[in-house]
Image (tube, rainbow, N blue to C red):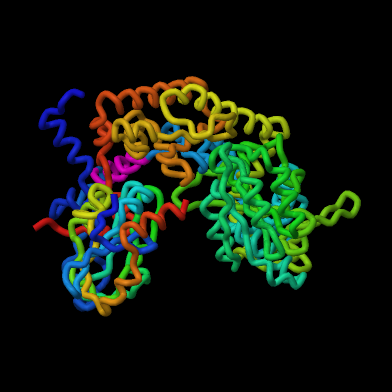
Amino acid sequence: MATKNPLQLKYEESRRRLLMDRSVPGRMGVSLPPNDVPEQPMPGSDILRNEMDFPEVTEGEIVRYFSQLSQFNFSIDHNFYPLGSCTMKYNPKVNDEVAGLRGFTDIHPLQPESTVQGALKLMWELQEYLAEITGMPGVSLAPMAGADGELAGMLMARAYHLERGDTQRTKVLIPDSAHGTNPATATMSGFEVVTLPSDARGDTDLDALRNSVGDDLAGLMITLPSTLGLFDSNIDQVVKIVRDAGGIVYGDGANLNALLGRVRMGDLGFDVMHSNLHKTFTQPHGGGGPGSGPVLVGPRLLPYLPTPWVTRRADGEDETFSFTTPEKSIGRMAAFHGNFGALVRAYAYISTLGKEGIAAISDDAVLNANYVMSQLKDDYDLPYDRVCMHEVVLSARTLKRQHGVSALDVAKRLIDYGIHPPTMYFPLIVEEALMVEPTETESKETLDYFIEVMKTIAREARDEPSLLHDAPHDTPNSRLDEARAARQPDLRWRRQT
Amino acid sequence: MNPAELKYSEEHEWVQVESETVVLVGITEFAAESLGDVVYVDLPEVDANVGQFEKMGEIESVKAVSDLYSPVSGKITERNEQVLDNPQLVNDAPFEGGWLIRVLLDDPSQLDKLMSADQYESFLASQD
């Protein structure tokens, strides 16, 4: 790397400077009109803080400041973003455009149903699409995100057992390859969590499962494909064992991107699942929203579906749509009808792609992940050497042992090559895990670039490990104390004295 | 690997008896290795009281956040400020520079509820 001269360093420093540090006394961003009202005394110091400064900058300076901040951002619109489990795929802009149509944005959730029949029809048709894609007949679009959909699902399982008087059914089995939200959901729903181990191939350990089911079994929460990126080859038996023991089978559909048009959880005998519309069916997401996590149920749980649920009544050519409450509904999951904008985007996405396009998503997502796996298995550890689904879990175990380079170092070095770090240290059962989800929208050229970069980083780890320990090198800030930033978010600016 | 002069809890903390009423507390090498790289340690304030086998703080690694349990009851007389500034010390030297708190014991007989190094190693073996 060429060293930077003092002027270049000064420029870099200036880009990191906060707005308050750019302030010059007396500088103005606007010309205020002359005062044409009587002057009023200022409130006392109990209300106004003397030490609070305001930035004084010109309009041009403030425009540059915020434009520069926006350039520090990294998104799927900038570059490759293989963040496993999060499915950061490209979101076609037309779906945003559709969701922005005035007919969708200028309506109010408390309007009479007769005045929003179009919106209700869209929701009903989306329910039908999701039912067909998953093979689950009942759909509620109300949950606001994946974890909310999970909670709805487990509250339904609870209502089901309670209605049968099965109050002893308190145990929920969760494989160690499940999403981290699953145990949290089961606990929040009042169940006791029992972790199931994975077998040597990464599938659910059937002997452990058989030994764990009994009269106290409430159900099983399983992520399919698992967070190892694997399709559980024991799934038929897993479902049968749980159902035979009287348990509810919950499917975490966060990885539905791998199954579209090929496998339906309803056909496998699942009782309930959720689908993250923001992952599988387009939606700019991350940073906490906006999500949408519809919950889908089979016949056993249909009467318990959360409200509202959109139903259709046909009378010849005429059709009427209305919000309905199922007979034994567990109630509302949100104040109104879910994240409606997210529903419109998902509807537009599914309608545009059609049946064949939907299946092509998963075919390409799985193909891309397997291509990456086949090219990188000699450079990184591959804990489960078998065909993967839409994501591949690699490990930096050997790099760590032999060269002291961790998964975190590899991830940080990727930033220098313009690639967003993959998910790290998850799933927990894989040491130094690097979970790569290329997604279906990336070209072979992009994947080849990523593969070349990963191979280069593995070489750098052997030849020049310090390069990785200090990465990233080309960002405005390098290694940040992320744990402290999250735990002590002290964001107050103070004048340097 | 587990020093013979220390005592151990099932939550993988060690206790070094410094005098009749003062002990030093940290987490074991096994715990540090299982956690992976430690990025944050949250400890009780000096003068705070902790109870034996009760939650006293949190330790966050690149993998997960775990609760810290105090192996003894007493009053905190000192926290390892170096660990708070540089949590990686817990991985680098769990039994030495990576110690966490110094405690004035309420009841020295509580030490009898802890394990010896040999007992702790058998305990670890039984957990597999």
| Residue located 73% across and 70% down the image | A166
Towards the viewer: A204 or A94 = A204
Residue A50: name its quadrant.
bottom left
Task: Provide residue A6's location: percent of width, then percent of height.
Answer: 10, 32
Up the image or down, B8 lies above or below A396; here it is: below
Residue sitting nearer the eye, A110 or B10 = B10
Please identify the quarter of the rendering in which residue A215 is found: bottom right
Residue at 59% in and 29% down: A387
Q: Can residue B78 be seen from the camera position used here?
A: yes
- In front here: B89 or A2? B89
Is A237 on the left-hand or right-hand side of A94? right
- Residue positioned most to the left: A497
Q: In the displayed image of the protein, which residue is found farthest to the front?
A: B118
Q: Position of residue A146 (x, y in %)?
A: 57, 53
- Horizontally, is B116 left or right of A54 in the view? right
Asked if one can make out residue A39 in the rendered structure from this viewpoint, the answer is: no
What residue lies at 38% left-to-right and 62% top-to-bottom? B11
State the image coordinates of residue A439 (x, y, percent, origin top left): 54, 33
- The residue shown at (71%, 34%) is A262
Does residue A67 show up magenta in the picture? yes
| Towards the viewer: A209 or A348 | A209
Determine whether A340 is above or below A332 in the image: above
Image location of residue B84, percent across then percent down: 23, 58
Whether residue A331 appears in magenta in the rendering, the answer is no
- Residue A168 figure quarter: bottom right
Q: Main secondary structure of the magenta part?
A: helix
Mark count: 0
Residue A336's place in the image compared with A238, above or below, is below
Q: Which residues are magenta?
A: A61-73
